Amino acid sequence: MASSKYMDTEHERLDGGHRDMWHKVNAAVVEANASPLSTNLPLAPVPEIDISCFVAPEQASDADRELVVQQVLSASQSLGFMNIIGHGVPHSLVDSVLCALRSFFESSVELKQQCIAKSMHGTFRGYTPFRFENHNAALGRPGPSDRRELYSFGPAQHQGGSAFGENTYPEFVDGFQHFIEEYYAECERLEKVLLEIFTLALAKSTGQSLDPQYLQHQIRPNRGLLAACWYPACEPSILEDGASSLEDGVSGHTDWGPLTILLTTSPGLEVCIWSQQEQKHQWRSVPVVPGAFTINVADQLARWSNDRFVSCVHRVNTNHCCQSSRISIPYFSTQVLPLTATDEPKVGCICAEGEVPKYEPLSIRGYLQQNCSRLQHAGRNAGA
């Protein structure tokens, strides 16, 4: 039993808490699916934030940094999504990674099968075939498997990755390994910057004095998972009443880590928003900003903030660009675990003076392994 000093909330225990959380997610998804198509609604209110003052702090003032912290805090407390620019990731590297991944996914099934994913304690590394995963089944609701292929990576051996398992690279795509490893290093650099900003935002919202590297220390020793997603071209799928199709690329869900860094160049990402005017949930499209990364608060950061920050339900709706293939590259913070269990910190809520924490301190490993296991198990048993 949980200690009586913790509130009875949906996350209080791993099993019962997940069921309650998933029930709320599913209710919102069902309601949003019955709403008008996002193409007939305004874009989601996702702010664009320039974080260059944290990427190159020697060129910025304290006022510049304070403004960014306030912008990130406001975004985290409302929708939990933001588009960031001034991130310092070279455009040439982004183009090279996208080109290499497209070459891989457009290869024959026989070639791609050479890189089939291997389980690394619940996290898959390598190629995952079309419709292998099923977010619907993982959340206990009816619906098709994910209409996508995946290629997942952790840190390379020369990036300290020996304790986390091995990546698989295709020999039939020139430069593939080099570009992926360079891009992974950039994502880790950017993750560190973002964790500092989120730490300062938490300190500002709670009145607590936190070391700027607080969250960076809490996620150790875990590393990020880079997961290239490929959505093949398809026919539009619209329900008879004109509402959103159930044939999503990936159905409604929240992310499990502290945060996600997403690279995408085409529409398709949608967030589930409560409409004050309509008094119901709706899907709204996240604006695509050329050269930007889309950042979203995920479950663990929302938990650590004692629910000050929002982990928003989102999905990929491939009806937006079904005539052509779509590629996106999310980097999921903390989702690669050491192969050998270590003494990981159990991260507790960061609360204001006198505030009661809603959640018990929780190991990242335990939280992620349960979710990964449930998702993969559901995908294998749900069928296409």
Image: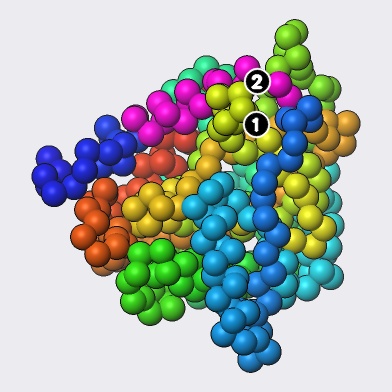
The boundaries of the magenta stretch are: 19-37
How is the rendered protein coloured? rainbow
Q: Is residue 193 visible?
A: no
Q: Which mark is residue 283?
A: 1
Identified at 18% across, 47% down, the residue is 6
Looking at the image, the residue that sits furthest to the top is: 240
In the image, residue 177 lies at what x, y percent?
71, 66
Considering the image in quadrants, where does the N terminus appear?
A: top left
Q: Is residue 116 magenta?
A: no
Inter-mark Cα distance, 2 to 1: 8 Å
Identified at 22% across, 38% down, the residue is 8
Considering the image in quadrants, where does the C terminus appear?
A: top right
Amino acid type at image mark 2:
Ser
Check if mark 2's residue and mark 1's residue have beta carbons within 8 Å: yes
Identified at 38% across, 79% down, the residue is 211
Identified at 36% across, 57% down, the residue is 304
Sequence-first disc among 2 and 1: 2
Quadrant of the rendered image containing residue 89: bottom right
Above or below, comparing residue 133 to residue 165 in the picture: above
Residue hosting label 2: 35
